[in-house]
Image: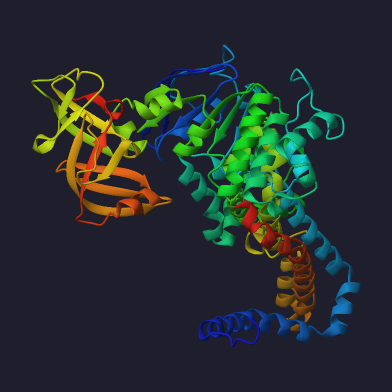
Amino acid sequence: MIGLRGLEVEAGGFVVGPLDLDVTAGEYGVLLGPSGAGKTLVLEAVAGVRRIRAGRVLIDGDDVTSLAPERRRVGLVFQDGLLFPHLDVAHNVAYGARRRGGVGRPTLGSDAGRLAELAEKAGITRLLNRKPATLSGGERQRVALARALAARPRVLLLDEPLSAVDAEAREELQDVLRRVSRAERLTVLHVTHDRAEAFALADRCALLVGGALRQTGAPCEVLRRPADEAVARFLGARNILAATRADDDARVAVLSAGVRLRAAEPLSSALATVVVRPENVQVWRAGDAPPAASVLHGRVVRLALQGGHVLISVDTPARFEALVPERVAERLGLTVGAGVDITVEPEAVHVLPRR
Amino acid sequence: MRGRRPSLFAALCAVAGAVLVAFVLLPAASMVVGAGAGLLGDALRQDDVRRSLWLTLVAALIATAAAFVVGVPLAYLLARRDFAGKRLVEGVIDLPIVFPHTAAGIALLTVYGSEGFMGRLLAPLGLRFTETVAGIVLAMLFVSLPFLVDTAREAFALVDERYEKVARTLGSSPGGAFARVTFPLAWRGVFAGAVLMWGRGISEFGAVVILAYNPKVISVLTFERFEGFGLRAAQPPAVLIVIVAFVVFVVLRTVLLPRRRRSRKGVA
């Protein structure tokens, strides 16, 4: 397991923390946050390659705060793999290879069985004689993973390991990471800014924004119930609206221009922020909306293509954004200026107290 | 690209380069031609010229080796660490470049001469720096040290520091990471600096002549022959050292440069 207790790291005047975080044994933890949030600093602090300002780092219950990186037994994989360019793949993998129990250093030949097994797991058997310069981004990351695992780490630290590879290789690598981490029963701390990557891999997510840990939880929980506006915004909840609690019904949030939106739970404070994910906003032709808790009438003000979906901005007059499949947008015959109805299920309305 | 005419800019660069190459080549070629093959052969048969040539090459090599031992760790430190007074240290290392070399010789004499602080300290150990090979090495070391340290520092700075971080997590100590990763990636740059330093050392005259007129290095021998017997007598030893240094430079660059070009992408 990995435990951070009041961890503070500083780089160039930017301070991360104090952070308290636990990744339990065998868990795949993802530290998710925008660029510049301080994720890599945290990872390097756990690895021991960056000096910390305060706090403690625990690995498998041992306080390793004052241990040198080479004595912590952590595996570190950076974004670009960072294979040693002067060594071929086999020697890269064998660089830190340890015998079972972590004692002694085998040569390439003496622990060939283990290295071959790792090469097989990482899918790099046919690459062993190649130099790093001849490998693709995905291949480099596989080799970097095998190299880290060959050192029999207690925990695996991954710094944006998928961001430098193309989409196809990224999916393959995700499979490799998931498979290998399970097979080796590894405790993993994976840092990324990519929400999709986090949700594809994480048992648990921790949200780091502006150097502060804002929320931890299961990926779906974090996605549905962001702890604050910053987390909601980062996770792509495009509808973040100021609201007041209706006098006549505590479950109704009153938005600008008196637009009323029903939530599943009563609003806990008079002033609130309402968060609705765009994929939870349904769009209908004007007058076609079924009777629902919240039917809002508005006009389309913008249409934007996003992959196979269309992002629709609707003025109700409170501005809502809805994400619908392209075929749905086509079926509705949406154009800018068209009148539409939108509906939002009360369960999709997340309410944050506002001070 | 085949069949395309070079751009005007490329042509201008080529012309500028040609002017510079000619500027260096003309005096060197004139000296070689002026000396003639016969005179060069005669010079090689003269004991004092052969001794002087050997002394010059070896003294410069010893100075380079000494600088390697102390300069490479310093270069690494300057490339990797920020510390109070770092700019001052870098300035001090570069000082010999701007020091007039005769003044450097005088400065060394005041410290390492028989009346100097270090001279008196080291004399009981049998180390004397006036009129000795040790003095020649000392003078060469002083004036040429920056070439090794500065070049090695740049070579280390080009190696991504994260390689060392990865090596540390894979079980290497700081020294192990340096030996197994950083130095193997930077060695061409470090050796390029060593070659530059060696080349600068063999050409040194001003500082050497103040500390050790004897035994004579090739630059001092050339000067003595010029003073005593004129231009024609001075040319053969001068030409010899130029030819030897040129051959060594070309051979080393041939060995180092192709790989350096290829490695630029992977290392930086």
x, y percent for residue A307: 43, 51
Q: Is residue B159 left or right of residue A206?
A: right
Where residue B25 sits in the image (x, y, percent)? 68, 81
Q: Quadrant of the N terminus of chain A?
A: top right
Residue B117 makes an appearance in the image? no
In the figure, A83 relative to A63: above or below?
below
Measuring from the top left, give residue A106's x and y in whole percent: 82, 28
Closer to us: A325 or B209: A325
Viewer-proximal residue among A87 and A334: A334
Kindly indicate the quadrant of the structure image that contains residue A113.
top right
* Relative image position of residue A15 (x, y in whole percent): 37, 30
- Quadrant location, the C terminus of chain A: top left
Residue at image point 64% right, 79% down: B24
Identify the residue shown where x is 45% and y is 33%.
Answer: A39
Q: Residue at x 75, y 77 (%)?
A: B234
Residue closest to the eye, A335 or A322: A335
Asked if B30 appears above or below B207 in the picture, the reply is below
Apparent side of residue B101 relative to residue A350 in the rendered image (left or right):
right
Residue A199's place in the image compared with A330, above or below, is above
